[in-house]
């Protein structure tokens, strides 16, 4: 049976963007500040986890807005003497060593007078970068996303080091995916230290011989990135496989080193608990305030607060099902193996 969804899926695959640059030979600007271990699996062309579905919707959404709205609008709207380079079909990938980037565009002032855009003055002969991002309308941005800030730093650094242009600023343009007239623009000014860090991260990733040579940064950061990672199970397996099987005595210097690590961990754990308690107390005060003022939403410049109820998650009552004589074992599956670190201190 033919379905519209199947037609869309087939079309998405057939029209997937083809890159002239070998993306396995470098670390791209959009991924260099993501989890390095995830990047390593991708560079090794590791198969995705069984059952992982590669959603193309957000990527295609961004491509469509860029090609049919962002670029045509800029080409039509920029004044005479101001040129848009490296945009649309003329996009250019810049490569230096293990680092690469494909900017969405570079605005160059070819006129003999200042050009002002988003409050930023571009003098004659100067330039400013532009980066297009589509955004879910449910996201409330107070500033550019951290990964996008890192991405445009790499773009600026590569443009500055590999071309005649010296951009100091990139405008990160967020277009609401639902109402495309809703636009937020955040200028990001170049920081050489951020670019240098990105370059080093690219080298670290490309030189790693195995996954465990890189920290599972997504997990360390709280696991949000792991939720959508195509290598989550393979990463977990690599971690578990690396757990030592034996118990060996340590030398005095090694004992001193791990003692310092344990002390630091206990201090961080205590600080985490205190911070969590303070955070919870602050949230409860906000809820109490909103209840007292009889309002569920408040918004001001740079922040907003929304207070609402959320339906409980649907779950299966295992005990009730078993009492009814239902055998659920055929529908059970074992999760990925995981690591556990237990630390106990004596007072």
Image (cartoon, rainbow, N blue to C red):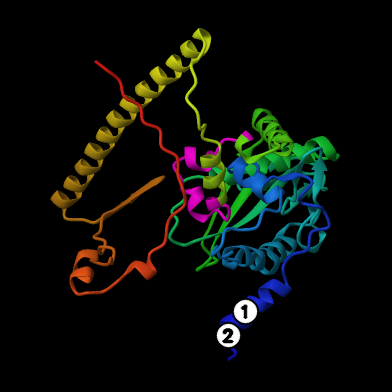
Q: CA distance from mark 1 to mark 2?
A: 6 Å
- Asked if residue 240 is positioned above or below residue 85 in the image, the reply reads above
Which residue corresponds to the image point at 20% horizontal and 64% vertical from the top-left? Answer: 319
Q: Which residue is mark 2?
A: 4
SS assignment at label 2: helix
Lateral position of residue 208 relative to residue 91, left or right: left
Query: In x, y percent, where is residue 202?
Result: 71, 37
SS assignment at label 1: helix
Lateral position of residue 312 relative to residue 173, left or right: left
Task: Look at the image and give the residue range highlighted in magenta.
Answer: 213-233
- Asked if residue 58 is positioned above or below residue 126 in the image, the reply reads below
Indicate the quadrant where residue 347 lies: top left
Query: In x, y percent, where is residue 175?
Result: 56, 60
Disc 1 crowd rating (10 Å Cα; few below 14, some 14-19, many 20+) is few
Query: In x, y percent, where is residue 285?
Result: 20, 41
Which residue corresponds to the image point at 60% horizontal and 53% vertical from the top-left? Answer: 173
202 magenta-colored? no
Q: Which residue is mark 1?
A: 8
- Asked if residue 287 is positioned above or below residue 65 in the image, the reply reads above
- Asked if residue 267 is positioned above or below residue 24 in the image, the reply reads above
């Amino acid at each position: 049976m033919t379905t519209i969804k199947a037609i869309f899926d087939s079309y998405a695959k057939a029209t997937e963007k083809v890159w002239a640059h070998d993306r396995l030979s470098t670390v791209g600007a959009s991924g260099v500040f993501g989890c390095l271990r995830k990047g390593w699996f991708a560079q090794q062309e590791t198969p995705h986890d069984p059952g992982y579905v590669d959603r193309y919707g957000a990527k295609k959404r961004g491509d469509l807005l860029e090609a049919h709205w962002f670029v045509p609008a800029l080409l039509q709207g920029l004044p005479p003497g101001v040129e848009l380079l490296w945009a649309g079909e003329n996009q250019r990938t810049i490569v230096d060593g293990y680092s690469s980037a494909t900017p969405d565009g570079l605005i160059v002032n070819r006129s003999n007078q200042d050009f002002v855009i988003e409050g930023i003055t571009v003098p004659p002969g100067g330039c400013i970068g532009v980066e297009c991002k589509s955004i879910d309308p449910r996201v409330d941005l107070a500033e550019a996303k951290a990964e996008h800030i890192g991405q445009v730093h790499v773009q600026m650094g590569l443009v500055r080091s590999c071309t005649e242009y010296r951009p100091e600023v990139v405008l990160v343009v967020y277009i609401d995916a639902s109402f495309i007239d809703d636009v937020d623009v955040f200028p990001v000014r170049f920081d050489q230290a951020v670019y240098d860090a990105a370059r080093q991260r690219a080298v670290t990733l490309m030189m790693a011989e195995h996954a465990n040579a890189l920290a599972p940064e997504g997990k360390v950061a709280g696991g949000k990135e792991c939720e959508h990672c195509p290598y989550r199970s393979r990463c977990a397996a690599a971690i578990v496989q690396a757990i030592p099987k034996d118990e060996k005595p340590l030398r005095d210097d090694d004992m001193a080193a791990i003692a310092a690590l344990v002390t630091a961990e206990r201090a961080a754990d205590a600080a985490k608990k205190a911070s969590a308690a303070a955070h919870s107390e602050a949230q409860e005060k906000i809820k109490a305030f909103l209840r007292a003022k009889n309002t569920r939403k408040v918004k001001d410049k740079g922040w907003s607060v929304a207070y609402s109820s959320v339906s409980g998650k649907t779950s299966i009552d295992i005990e009730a099902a078993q009492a009814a004589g239902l055998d659920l074992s055929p529908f059970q599956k074992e999760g990925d193996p995981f690591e556990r670190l237990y630390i106990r201190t004596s007072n």
